[in-house]
Image: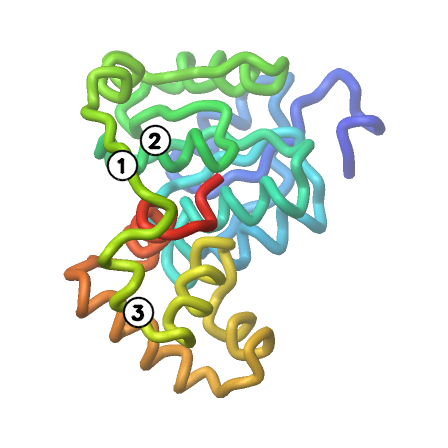
Amino acid sequence: MSGLRFPQQLLFLFFQQTLGSLLRSKPDIEIIGEAENGQVALEMAIALQPDVVLMDVRMPVLDGVAAIRSLEQKAPDIKVLVLTTFDDDDYITQAMSFGAKGYLLKDTPSEELAQAIRAVHKGYTQMGPGLFEKVMLAPTHTEPETSPEFDQLTSREKEVLQLIAQGLNNREIAQSLYISERTVKNHVNSILSRFNLRDRTQAAIFASRISPWKK
């Protein structure tokens, strides 16, 4: 399925199953896929080529921020609308800078969500109430080309962190670096522990701040 075959319908890859029945009632929105984790979501989006992907920032296997960045690189014509419970400045900034076209919270009424999907489909940016101001008022930081934190990493950890920032999962990183998945996992755990990072989403955000691979 593609938008060219169905010009009157919005093709939509949907990750929040509880809202599915509400959105299915909209005649111009067609749900063409659902995914249980970020990696499956990314693979399905590339395969199905929906017009809009509804994405959370916290998902198992591959987090949403990394999936958004990878989708922007691999399928830039697909528009991403974030729907999440997290209103952290970092998540909003990174999701939008990595290619998301909108950011809404999960308490958004279904009719407003449907309108946001339509707007993103048309190319407009959508932000939930107060989120735009939240990002604009966030303090800015001037970073050197590399930082002391970046220099603390080993050469291999730098490679792993770069690939995390590009949205690769452990299996893909292992294949790219010709090392075992166990070794990759050890490097990831070392990076998270050393810098007190909660998960791969924070690692990707951390990479964008301290490394020379910033967009």
Q: Position of residue 105 (x, y in %)?
A: 30, 27
Q: Residues within 10 Å of mark 2 (few under 14, many from 20)?
A: some
Residue type at mark 2?
Thr
- Please identify the quadrant where the N terminus is shown: top right
Amino acid under label 3?
Answer: Leu
Q: Is residue 10 above or below residue 78?
A: above
Residue at x 75%, y 16% (from the top left corner): 8
Q: Residue at x 46, y 82 (%)?
A: 181
**What secondary structure is marked by label 1?**
helix
The circle drawn on residue 153 is 3
| Distance of label 2 from label 1 (alpha carbons) | 5 Å
Distance of mark 1 from mark 3, alpha carbons? 22 Å
Question: In the picture shown, does residue 39 fall above or below 179?
Answer: above
Mark 2 or mark 3, which is nearer the start of the sequence? 2
The residue at 49%/34% (across/down) is: 54
Q: Which residue is mark 1?
A: 90
The residue tagged 2 is: 93
- Looking at the rendered structure, the kind of residue marked 1 is Asp
Give the farthest residue toward the front. Answer: 144
